[in-house]
Amino acid sequence: MEKIVVVGAGQAGAACVAKLRAEGFAGRITLIGEEHAPPYQRPPLSKAYLLGEMALERLYLRPESYYAENGIELLLKTRVTGIDREGRQVRAGDAAYPYDALVLATGSVPRRLPSSIGGDLDGVHTVRTLRDVDAMEPGMQPGRRALIVGGGYIGLEAAAVARKRGMEVTLIEMSERILQRVAAPETSDYFRALHRSHNVDIREGVGLTCLVGVDGRVTGAIFSDATEHPFDMVIVGIGITPATTLAEAAGLAIENGIRTDGQGRTSDPAIWAAGDCASLPDKGDRIRLESVPNAIDQAEAVAKNILGAGADYVPQPWFWSDQYDVKLQIAGLNTGYDRVVVRDGGAARSHWYYKGETLLAVDAMNDPRGFMIGKRLIEAGKSPAPELVGDAEADLKPLLKG
């Protein structure tokens, strides 16, 4: 194998090329990205970077010089327009880049509001890229009014930052509660109370009928309850979808993302996928994980498998979210839970998800100890008695030795 091309210069793409070199691959590596900046961290974009607490250069995963120094051809502002599977090359404009192995690390794209309800007005933003946040920042001024559409983690994080910037914030969620798709009512209750304590106007069971504007710029919104409200800015946090357009056009199998086997190989044995765009088998099911840890771990596993490791990637899901002075850490996947045990240690609090007697996941709020113990228990396949977990005075650490 002499030539490896990686499409997508985000967290997964950067992790893949670095691991290829670390594992001793001496051939040609080309990393292609559409953005103007070298690979960077996305989580701090809408928090520390937007708040002015992190300089642009600190966002970069590695100094830009790293790529040239390690013989990695980094192509920025370059959009791949097609994959020639038979000829084993990718096309970008008039240029073609041959490959022996191709990695698709195309990530995900934010869902947007349709133009029919005003989604294309100026002042309507999504939070995904450096360009998105740079466009948003000038409008986030004290006293201005922001509407957050969507009560998932993206929307809640945006609401927290807008309040820290001194804006008046209203958040609407069309479901009956915030975080309904991803968390238990107990976690929803916790974050609802947190945001309301910071004077965020949270409205659940309320959708968006349309945005209104003047001279092409958003000035307000009409909600599903027929009320109209003035706003200076709208931030849309209604989820993301895997970026599969390129893979679909190439005829690769798609199933909630680019379908891969356990090693990260797509339906074409010369093409691999990793990160937000990839769906993978897990415990007899098929999942797609939207997280930085998964992007790194899966991409590194793919790099090793391209070089012949032949090992299935076993995901160990964990996530995090920062809102005000609360750090939420999540271990595991709560799919199918039928019971939630609350461990209330005052400032430190955690919610433990069970299916029967089996521990599935933990939501830990300012409780790093509970998170780490829960994560290790889940990874080891151990399930402490719910009654023990619910006793905030009980020490769970000895369970790790059992």
Image (cartoon, rainbow, N blue to C red):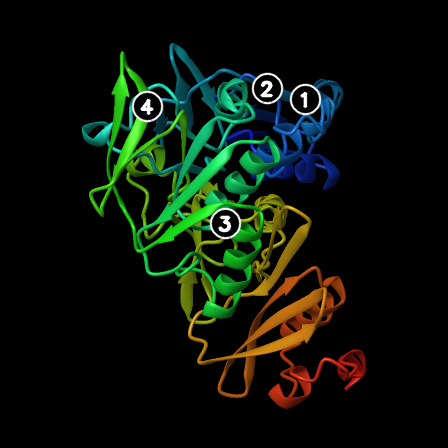
Q: CA distance from mark 2 to mark 1?
A: 10 Å
Residue behind mark 2? 37
268 vs 35, left or right, is left
In which quarter of the view is residue 329 placed? bottom right
Q: Secondary structure at mark 4?
A: strand
Counting other residues with Cα less than 10 Å from the Cα at mark 4, is it few (<14), some (14-19), or many (20 or more)? many
Badge nearest the viewer, 2 or 4: 4
Which residue corresponds to the image point at 68% horizontal and 28% vertical from the top-left? Answer: 59
Residue 152 in percent (x, y) is at 44, 50
Give the structural element (helix, strand or loop) at label 1: helix
Cβ–Cβ under 8 Å for marks 2 and 3: no
Query: Looking at the rendered structure, which numbered label has been put on residue 219?
Result: 4
Residue at position x 68%, y 35% in the image:
18
Query: Tag 3's secondary structure?
Result: helix
Dot 4 amino acid type:
Thr
Distance from disc 2 to disc 3, alpha carbons, whole Å, reads 25 Å
- The residues tagged by marks 1 and 3 sit, at their Cα atoms, a distance apart of 23 Å
Q: Nearer the N terminus, badge 4 or badge 1?
A: 1
